[in-house]
């Protein structure tokens, strides 16, 4: 009986243990099933996120491809712009006489050709030594006789960092002054002739040579454009009156005039960098009779084939075909302007190369086709005094043509062929295009 009781007790304990184990196993199984379900849900969510990420990655890859394509196009545009003859952006500098406090003073006007706003006036009195400024001002206003501040210099596009050159002369001698473009202060002021002589300068495109035609002195002076040291002087048999460099910078075209002297020749001289004569085309040969032409201004076309000359004795222009290889120059076209006018200068459109703009004192601006045809396309009226206009220049991008003279500066829209703005002043002496205006901000002259 006792043994049976013990056996029953053992069985009950075993059953209790088995029941506890079963319950624990059941709970663990349920927990495991929950973990598996949770893992399945997390896997499904991860798969969904992975699919979304793959979609985003595809979108990013497509965007990257699009940006790479745009970058390639932008690079092509940049390379095309680099290949253009002139920079896109830049500033215009004008040498201006204006009245301040009842006194006529000299200024450099800085004009932004993107807006045609006058952005700053630089008083030269504050930038130059007192003695130099006095001589320059006296020459500009012709307060002493004889004296002149040359309106033609400089006329061509300059390299970044190139000096601003001012040629002036009086009874005390004939000078060239170089101004630092960082602050318009004087770098050098050099007397290159000890008497009065009219002077006209041209800069070689590489910026190394400043060539000055000295009219009454009957010589052509070559200077180092950086140091202003005289390299050589070449004598002529009549009076040289301007200097136009060829596009490659290896030659210079110089009109030579008689200035009323009987027997003196009149011609255009082609001369090289060493001062050697290459060719000449005569208007009047030595000792020859006939009406004077007095060739005064000249321009060498961008294709290097033609030189344009304006005559001061009569309203006249000549187209001269130049072949430096054959050492020849010949007049191939002559044009006339209205009586009482003077063709002062011509300049070819720097971008389109399809037009030549001629500043004609007493008439306005004539637009002509390129030589040798050189036909009249149209005329542009100016707002400033047509009897006082003397010189012009294109903006670096070729959109505008600026004409200076008595009354200030006219801004002409090249496409519309009309004046869109006038910057008033007593008079403007010359205007040039500067390819880059960045140094204006660096030097503190302008504030961005």
Image (tube, rainbow, N blue to C red):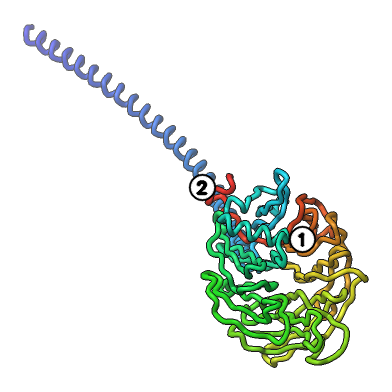
Q: Quadrant of the N terminus?
A: top left
Q: Quadrant of the C terminus?
A: top right
Image-quadrant location for residue 129 = bottom right
Residue 25 horizontal/vertical position (percent) = 27, 24
Q: Are marks 2 and 1 in contact (CB under 8 Å)?
A: no
User: Which residue is more in the foreground, 327 or 261?
Assistant: 261
In this rendering, does residue 138 appear at all? yes
Read off the residue under disc 2. Answer: 57
Q: Separation of disc 2 and disc 1 at Cα?
A: 53 Å
Query: Does 407 sit left or right of 108 as displayed?
Result: right
User: Which residue is more in the foreground, 196 or 285?
Assistant: 196
Query: Does 315 sit left or right of 350 as displayed?
Result: right
Read off the residue under disc 1. Answer: 401
Residue 425 to residue 321: above or below: above
- Say what secondary structure mark 1 lies in: strand
Q: In the image as oriented, which residue stretches furthest toward the left?
A: 2
Number of other residues with Cα within 10 Å of mark 1, as a class: few under 14, some 14 to 19, many 20 or more: many
The residue positioned 68% from the left and 57% from the top of the image is 95
Residue 357 horizontal/vertical position (percent) = 80, 68
Residue 8 horizontal/vertical position (percent) = 14, 11
The numbered mark, 2 or 1, whose residue comes first in the sequence reads 2
In this rendering, does residue 396 appear at all? no
């Amino acid at each position: 009986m006792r043994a049976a009781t013990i056996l029953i007790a053992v069985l009950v304990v075993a059953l209790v243990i088995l029941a506890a184990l079963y319950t624990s196993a059941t709970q663990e199984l349920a927990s495991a099933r929950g973990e598996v379900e949770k893992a399945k849900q997390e896997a499904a969510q991860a798969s969904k996120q992975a699919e979304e990420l793959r979609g985003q990655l595809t979108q990013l890859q497509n965007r990257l491809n699009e940006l790479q394509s745009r970058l390639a196009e932008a690079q092509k545009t940049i390379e095309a712009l680099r290949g253009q003859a002139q920079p896109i952006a830049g500033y215009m500098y004008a040498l201006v006489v204006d009245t301040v406090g009842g006194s006529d003073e000299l200024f450099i006007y800085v004009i932004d050709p993107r807006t045609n706003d006058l952005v700053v006036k630089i008083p030269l009195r504050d930038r130059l030594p007192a003695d130099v400024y006095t001589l320059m001002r006296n020459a500009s206003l012709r307060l002493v006789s004889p004296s002149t501040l040359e309106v033609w210099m400089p006329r061509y596009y300059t390299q970044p960092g190139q000096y601003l050159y001012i040629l002036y002369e009086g009874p005390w001698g004939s000078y060239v002054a170089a101004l630092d473009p960082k602050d318009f202060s004087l770098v050098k002021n050099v007397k290159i002739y000890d008497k009065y002589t009219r002077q006209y300068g041209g800069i070689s495109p590489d910026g190394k040579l400043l060539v000055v035609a000295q009219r009454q002195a009957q010589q052509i002076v070559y200077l180092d454009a950086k140091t202003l040291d005289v390299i050589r002087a070449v004598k002529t048999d009549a009076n040289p009156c301007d200097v136009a460099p060829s596009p490659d910078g290896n030659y210079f075209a110089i009109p030579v005039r008689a200035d009323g002297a009987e027997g003196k020749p009149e011609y255009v001289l082609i001369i090289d960098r060493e001062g050697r004569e290459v060719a000449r085309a005569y208007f009047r040969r030595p000792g020859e009779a006939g009406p004077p032409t007095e060739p005064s201004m000249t321009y060498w076309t961008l294709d290097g084939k033609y030189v344009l000359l304006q005559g001061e004795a009569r309203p006249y222009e000549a187209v001269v075909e130049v072949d430096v290889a054959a050492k020849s120059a010949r007049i191939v076209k002559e044009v006339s302007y209205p009586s009482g006018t003077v063709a002062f200068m011509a300049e070819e459109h720097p971008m389109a190369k399809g037009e030549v703009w001629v500043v004609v004192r007493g008439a306005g601006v004539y637009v002509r086709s390129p030589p040798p045809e050189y036909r009249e396309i149209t005329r542009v009226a100016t707002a400033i005094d047509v009897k006082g206009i003397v010189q012009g220049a294109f903006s670096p991008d070729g959109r505008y043509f600026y004409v200076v003279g008595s009354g200030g500066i006219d801004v002409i829209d090249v496409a519309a062929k009309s004046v869109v703005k006038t910057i008033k002043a007593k008079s403007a002496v010359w205007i040039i295009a500067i390819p880059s205006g960045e140094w204006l901000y660096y030097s503190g002259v302008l504030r961005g």
